[in-house]
Amino acid sequence: MFGPVEHRPFRLTLNSDGRSHPVENLLSIATLVVGLLAFITGFIPGAHVIASWAGALGFGGGLYSQYISATTPERALNVVGIVASFVGVALGIYHGGFMP
């Protein structure tokens, strides 16, 4: 009635187009990690310097990573990292800014 169903195993990959993108993948993962660092430290008032700098670096690096990204999964990681970086830098600046 509906025809044969093709079963493919679930694979988590950033290379959804079948080609390797090592630089783009590395930048996407770095954006996510730095963004999460900024986000988490943004809620700790004593870590405002880390949150501010990590957020600023994650935001700028994330924008560049978004610019050169090649696949949709890379772009999704970039957006999460950029938003987390923005929130982290905003909270870091609120708690005291870039200098101790």
Image (cartoon, grey):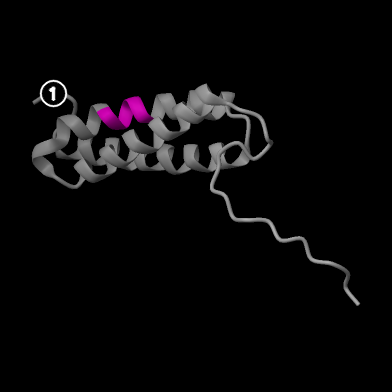
Q: Is residue 6 above or below residue 89?
A: below
x and y, in percent, of residue 28 in the image: 47, 32
Q: Is residue 100 left or right of residue 15?
A: left
Residue shown at 42%/34% (left/top)? 29
Q: Amino acid at mark 1?
A: Met
Q: Is residue 89 above or below residue 44?
A: above
- Point out the residue furthest to the bottom here: 1
The quarter holding residue 3 reads: bottom right
- Point out the residue furthest to the right here: 1
The quarter holding residue 26 reads: top left
Residue shown at 50%/30% (left/top)? 25
Q: For the N terminus, which image quadrant?
A: bottom right
Instruction: Indicate the secondary structure of the residue bearing disc 1.
Output: loop
x and y, in percent, of residue 35 in the image: 34, 37
Residue shown at 32%/33% (left/top)? 34
Residue shown at 26%/38% (left/top)? 37
State how many labels appear.
Answer: 1
Q: Residues within 10 Å of mark 1 (few under 14, many from 20)?
A: few
Q: State the residue position of label 1.
A: 99
The answer to whether residue 72 is magenta is no
The answer to whether residue 57 is magenta is yes
x and y, in percent, of residue 98 in the image: 18, 25
Overall secondary structure of the magenta stretch? helix
Q: Is residue 6 above or below residue 3?
A: above
Q: Relative to the observer, which residue lies in front, 31 or 48? A: 31
Q: For the C terminus, which image quadrant?
A: top left
**Which portion, as a residue range, is magenta?**
54-58
